[in-house]
């Protein structure tokens, strides 16, 4: 395995979103660090400096150390501390002390039974989109399928009227910086989209208080922590977190799955011929696509990860595309293998911060792969893939494809 040996570590800033628009999606840089500087002190001039960890064992150590690290001062590289402090204790993804109690409130909304109830709608969405677009010479898989499947599920869970779903897709993309490399989204545009999302759900929340249902917002309204109802702010922050985790993550994993299967035709054939591999294929897609680029913690006191001393107040970050391709943790790690087992990727985190939407995302990906392998005989890319310009999500915003349906079945 060769890496780009021209990486200048003095000038490297992993928070620069342009790194991830490169043809290799920034993997050359991450692999270089993994082999030469697996614990890299990333100096920044316009934000807090941080440690960047690219080895699997170090990532596991950070995730599992509840004593020495906190997520309350920022969950990802680039997040401002003021924003993190504003959400601390109120939002499932960033809370330490209240995390398990908030999780208990949220869990009834995302049980396997609830998820299974959505299966028909998922299959209808995916199957309909595949059938409708397969006759075209080319269509964008992200816009047409990968973006609509998770968002339709999230909107269904939150009780959003169907007429507003397209609006939600647009706002969510803008808010979370889902810009292609040639389409930069400004901070002002992101802020406006975030404000629109919060305002929309604030209206929906007010409506639900007068008319409770079985949707997630109603579950959060009924929820209690130590006998006290959640505030509107707490409910809205957690709704926003569900949109981020449940929509953006699955969208990029779904699009990445198609790219991986097109680029590895042997694995596509293998999956079509043996559908029993779909559960392991789902895990391999999650390992391979790693849509959440990094996760960050802040040291509460002086501590050590491996031989490296981390000082109190220093930030540490785990880079998912790198740790998920660590040869010390995954044999033949840089090969896409739909039958890989075991597959202990860190895409959904680990320990108490394991992504609450993980079961939902896995279910969505399973439905996608079942519908693809059951309906489509051949897939090909018809143009260049557009990478996201983001230091938050690692993914693609445009995947032009041509599909040929399998009318005979197999």
Image (cartoon, rainbow, N blue to C red):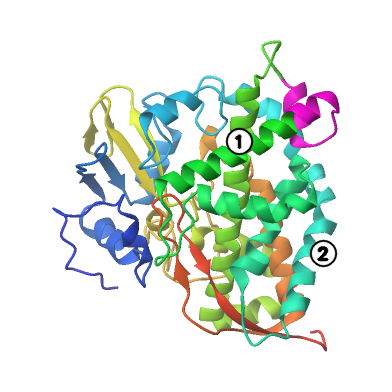
The residue that disc 1 covers is: 198
- Circle 1: is it few (<14), some (14-19), or many (20+) Cα within 10 Å? some
Q: Residue furthest top?
A: 227
Where in the figure is residue 387, as x and y percent of width and height? 44, 66
Question: Looking at the image, which is closer to me, 262 or 238?
Answer: 238
- Callout 2: SS: helix
| Residue located at (16% from left, 55% from top) | 9
The reply, left or right, for residue 339 in relation to residue 222 is left
Task: Name the residue beneath numbered marker 2.
Answer: 124
Query: Relative to the observer, which residue lies in front, 318 or 160?
Result: 160
Q: In which quarter of the image is the C terminus?
A: bottom right
- Please determine whether, in this image, residue 124 is positioned above or below residue 69: below
Q: Which residue is at 50% across, 61% downward?
A: 289
Q: Quick check: 316 above or below 367?
A: above
Which of marks 1 and 2 precedes in the sequence? 2
Query: Going by the image, does 340 lie left or right of 114?
Result: left
Q: Can residue 66 be seen in this view?
A: no
The answer to whether residue 84 is above or below residue 356 is above
**Where residue 92 sits in the image (x, y, percent)?**
57, 30
The location of residue 238, given as percent across then percent down, is: 61, 33
Picture residue at 54% right of the left edge, 85% below the top = 382
Q: Please give the range of residues in magenta.
A: 206-223
Q: How many labels does the image show?
A: 2
Callout 1: SS: helix
* Residue at 55% across, 63% down: 284
């Amino acid at each position: 395995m060769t890496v780009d040996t021209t990486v200048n570590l003095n000038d490297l800033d992993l928070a620069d979103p342009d790194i991830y628009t490169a043809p290799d999606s920034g993997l050359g840089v991450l692999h270089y660090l993994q082999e030469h500087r697996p614990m890299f002190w990333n100096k920044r001039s316009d934000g807090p400096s941080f440690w960047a960890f690219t080895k699997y064992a170090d990532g596991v150590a950070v995730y599992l150390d509840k004593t020495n690290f906190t997520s309350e001062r920022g969950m990802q590289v680039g997040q401002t501390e003021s924003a993190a402090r504003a959400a601390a204790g109120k939002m499932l993804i960033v809370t330490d002390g209240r995390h398990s109690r908030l999780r208990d409130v949220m869990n009834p909304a995302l049980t396997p039974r609830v998820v299974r109830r959505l299966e028909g709608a998922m299959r209808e969405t995916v199957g309909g989109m595949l059938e409708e677009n397969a006759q075209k010479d080319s269509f964008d898989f992200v816009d047409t399928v990968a973006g609509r499947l998770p968002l339709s599920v999230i909107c269904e869970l939150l009780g959003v009227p169907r007429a507003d779903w397209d609006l939600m897709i647009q706002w969510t993309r803008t808010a979370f910086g889902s810009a292609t490399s040639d389409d930069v989204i400004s901070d002002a545009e992101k802020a406006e989209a975030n404000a629109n999302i919060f305002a929309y759900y604030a209206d929906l929340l007010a409506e639900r208080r007068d008319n409770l249902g079985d949707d997630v917002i109603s579950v959060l309204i009924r929820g209690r922590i130590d006998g006290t109802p959640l505030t509107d702010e707490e409910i809205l922050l957690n709704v926003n977190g569900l949109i981020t985790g449940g929509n953006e993550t699955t969208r990029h994993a779904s699009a990445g799955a198609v790219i991986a299967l097109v680029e590895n035709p042997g694995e596509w054939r293998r999956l079509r011929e043996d559908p029993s591999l779909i559960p392991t294929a789902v895990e391999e897609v999650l390992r391979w696509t790693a849509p959440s680029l990094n996760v960050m913690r802040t040291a509460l006191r002086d501590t050590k990860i491996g031989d490296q001393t981390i000082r109190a107040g220093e930030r540490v970050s785990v880079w998912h595309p790198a740790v998920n391709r660590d040869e010390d943790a995954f044999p033949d790690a840089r090969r896409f293998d739909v039958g890989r087992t075991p597959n202990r990727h860190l895409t959904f985190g680990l320990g108490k911060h394991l992504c609450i939407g993980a079961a939902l995302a896995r279910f969505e990906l399973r439905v996608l792969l079942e519908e693809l392998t059951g309906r489509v005989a051949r897939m090909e890319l018809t143009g260049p893939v557009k990478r996201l310009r983001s230091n938050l999500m690692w993914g693609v915003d445009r995947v032009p494809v041509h599909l040929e349906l399998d009318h005979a079945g197999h």
